[in-house]
Image (cartoon, rainbow, N blue to C red):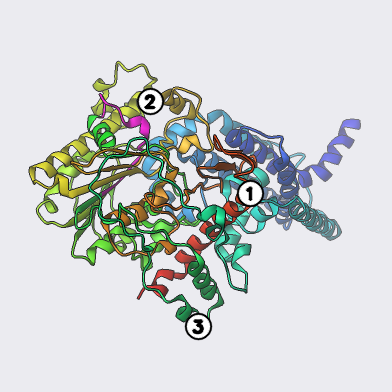
Amino acid sequence: MYMDKKIGLFQRYGSILFFPITIIYLESIFKIVVFKELFNIGIVYMILFSIPAGILLYLVSNLFSSRVNRTISIVLTVFLTFIFIVQIVYFHIFKTFLAIYSINGTGQVLQFWQEVLSAVKSKAAVILLLLVPLLLIISGKRVLFVKKVSIKTKAWLAFTMVCIQITATILVFASGTGELSTGFIYSKAVIPDLSMNRFGMLTTSRLDVKHLVFRVNSPRTEEKEEITAIADNTEILNKPQPEKTVETQDLQKPEINNDDNIMNIDFDKLIASESDPNIVSMHRYFKSVKPTKKNNYTGMFKDKNLIMITAEGFSPYAVNKDLTPTLYKMYQEGFRFTNFYTPMWGVSTSDGEYVACNSLIPKSGIWSFYISGKNYMPFCMGNQLKKLGYGTRAYHDHSYTYYHRDVSHPNMGYDFKAVGNGLNIKKSWPESDLEMIQKTADEYMGKTPFHTYYMTVSGHLMYTFNGNAMSAKNRELVKNLPYSSGVKAYLACNIEFDRAMGELIALLEQSGIADDTLIAISPDHYPYGLTNKEISELAGHQIETNFELYKGIFILWSKGIKSEEISKPCASMDILPTISNLMGVEYDSRLLMGRDIFSDAPPLVVFSNWSWLTDKARYNSKNGKFLLAEGETNESVNKQYRTEISKRVNDMFTYSEKILENNYYKKVIR
């Protein structure tokens, strides 16, 4: 009788508790697997937001007869389980989260079915744990979802749901202030890395939908008075930075010109004639931004040919005197940026390309490069040099439609060819960068001046000898290295990229234009196909995961230039303004988020989770820690500095998004 009474209680309350407990259970596993932690302040918010979500699902599953309700409950549980499995598998592969918008592109992701299967196998134990609630609901017919509850009970549940949701929201906004307060992340910013940890996956997905459907403005964009770019107009940040070089040699630079790198844009006239307050605020902001100045590197490669390369999964660890001699030679002979970073963004390769090609921060939750394909993008090197009479071409040795490059790349001013629309190379996975160079170089070598852009693929994951054709091709060259199999495979596939660069330079030399051509190489992202343990193996020490993990490489090389080491912090966002200045083209430095590395502008590297670093300090948004650079003191780097840099970072995210959303360049450059 006691057991019957106990079962009766569970029949009454078990079905009500099932969904809240299930969501909390799934969120807890997700938090442990992804963030390697559970018991932080985020678990409180996660539980509070999970309970109303669970009650809502229960109410949805209690609208009809018991049989229908049971079916609905099973379907909802399948859906919940599925989305958690998808996010964990996706994160395992790409080290970022699947945004709602990106669901449209999951068909492209499934091209990497081998990687998906490998991830599922790797996370099999976790997936089994995620399936527990589903197994319970299928096998628990006697105790779950037996009867419909009364209207009165439903009303009380709805009231409870609303009260808990309101309580959770109040606690979020009362949780304090600071650069990245919990309330700011919940209501204004889109920072999945922080939001997932603080609120959970379901709440972050809800916020993602909200930001996707409703344009949520950052607080700093809602000002109605004249906007001042605080971070660009302070004595601290505008103090000219001495160039930090270890080895500086005569580069035959043009005569120094210290004029501002700006265009003739009459912001006052634009403000007076604009009726949209949102655009007016943008005009005021960009008018107030301090431009970078021309310098003794301006026009150093004016009228020269330019080859820009975004190298898939490239990193400093792939540059080796014996394994990749061409890349090693280019790095040693050219400009050596020893403090260069390649931050990871939400749409991995596509966002990495977008940042390097446009000097803008991609908008979280969408495919920014694809969206930009309908906008006027005058500062891309393709568009800048095309109007000067250059032949401008772009190539990619994989599918031409992947990430919608057939939309974004022609819009940058390029005649674009890839596999499927004119580039005919041997079918493999991944394809050969060397073969791409061999098949395309003749199209532009004899037609100077030219600008060519390459997006490579040989360095793509998986880093195995049975799942990567380029790794298998070069396996013999790495078999005796003292590394694990994954690391060897990574180095082996980058040997193919090195051979491609060797072929490219040889063809330039045969054409007699190697000393008239500037080559710029940077990664799209760090090699996330390697585990942190494997990257640490390459680094020779335990890698730090908020900053050091994203330490990248930027090669600027032309035959005959003398080497120079630049040690100030810089990142992929700085590539476009730096090359624009070197090529001596007209551009407006106020309208780009990056800075000409060779200018005296203060360095600032920004990461997707709103962490940042300068030559004076760094801020880790994950733990809120602010650390001074070596040699700096609290007197030279005070609280005002931290606040101003954080405001500048806020502005960079905000106005990058607004430029994309409003096709802003078309409004100011006519």
Task: Look at discs 1 and 2 and give the one toward the viewer.
Answer: 2
Mark 2: few, some, or many residues within 10 Å (few <14, many ≥20)?
many
Task: Look at discs 2 and 3 and give the one toward the viewer.
Answer: 3
Specify whether residue 72 is in view.
yes
Which quadrant of the view contains residue 5?
top right
Quarter of the image where the C terminus is located: bottom left
601 displayed left or right of 196: left
**Disc 1 from disc 3: Cα separation:** 45 Å
Residue 315 lies in the magenta-colored region = yes
Q: Secondary structure at mark 1?
A: helix
Residue pointed to by mark 1: 202
Residue pointed to by mark 3: 272
164 displayed left or right of 420: right
Label placed on residue 487: 2
**Residue 605 higher or lower than 3, as above or below:** below
Q: Residue furthest right?
A: 1
